[in-house]
Amino acid sequence: MTHVPKPPPDRPLPPPMPPPAAAPAAAGLRVGAAALMLGALALLLAATVAFALVPLFGGAGSAWVAALAAALGVAVAGAPAIWLLLQRAAEMAPGAGRADAAHAPPAGMPHALFVTLAEREFARARRYGTGAALVLVDIDRYSRLCQARGAAAGTAVLAELLRRTAPTLRTADVLTHFGASQMAVFLVHADATGALDVAERIRERSEQMEVVFPETPQGLRLRVTVSAGVAHLRPAHLSLQAMIDDALDAVAAARAAGGNCVRAAPVDNLAAGRPGPFADRRSKTRPQPPRPPGGT
């Protein structure tokens, strides 16, 4: 029986939603090869039928039969290839989003379904070496927000972050409400740099967004920041749970650094006080304190 990783115990799971369909690259290649073989067989069959029917018609009729058979063969051979190209283009188009991402309720897909899809893509990435990454995003000072404005305010902020993130993902990527203050994104065919770029864009988007909270008479606008942790698939990751653990450690390192930043696993360098090459993706200039009059 497959072990299903669970979020921290104080993180409630979101409500369920219908499962999406996935179209990985390896399956696309197999479909493409099958389409080419089918086209070749269709052309061979059309030519055979044309030659078999020639004696039934006169000289003029044989030409029409051959032309009709050739047209039929080309149509049968080209249709699967055109379908495959359109399918792959729709899959990789940024902003297209999966059906579960673009049209899902704010809570995203349930945790168990996320784990099922992520484990499948995790196994493919390990088998074919195509790369994958997990991004966990945690809202900074979420408990303080809920204490000051109520649990509905925290839910509204996370729902808006999910809503703004979903259309920016590719079709094959998987998005979920991972916990009370977290969301998770499993990135398919992603390298370390690409995963960090996705996490940084999410951080920037959250920093700029304003969430109108209608529960207050004045329509209070809420602003938040997030801490993001990135775990890129490594040989040490023998299971999806290992990636989740690394991503949680990276989120903890981002929170320990003050929040509003992105950290990448492994975090050994951070624990030793030596920032790694992708430790902090923010590029902010901190204001210098004013010098006292007459100071040097």
Image (cartoon, rainbow, N blue to C red):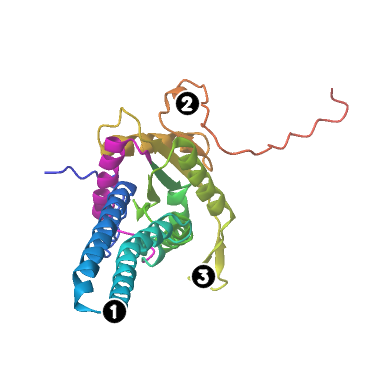
Query: Residue 13 location, x and y as percent?
Result: 28, 55
Element carrying mark 2: helix
Element carrying mark 1: helix
Query: Residue 31 location, x and y as percent?
Result: 28, 54
Q: Main secondary structure of the magenta part?
A: helix
Residue highlighted by disc 3: 216
Give neighbour class at mark 2: few <14, some 14-19, many 20+ (Cα, 10 Å).
some
Of callouts 3 and 1, the N-terminal one: 1
202 vs 81, left or right, is right
| Mark 3 residue type | Thr
Of callouts 1 and 2, the N-terminal one: 1
Residue at the spot x=35%, y=59% of the render?
81
- Picture disc at residue 270: 2
Residue highlighted by disc 1: 61
* Whether residue 43 can be seen here: yes
Q: Residue furthest front?
A: 59
| Mark 2 residue type | Leu
Q: Is residue 153 above or below residue 243?
A: below
**CB under 8 Å between discs 3 and 1:** no
Give neighbour class at mark 1: few <14, some 14-19, many 20+ (Cα, 10 Å).
some
Residue at the spot x=31%, y=53% of the render?
32
Give the magenta part as a residue range: 105-132
Q: Nearer the viewer, mark 3 or mark 1?
A: 1
* Whether residue 107 can be seen here: no
Between the C-alphas of marks 3 and 1, the distance is 81 Å
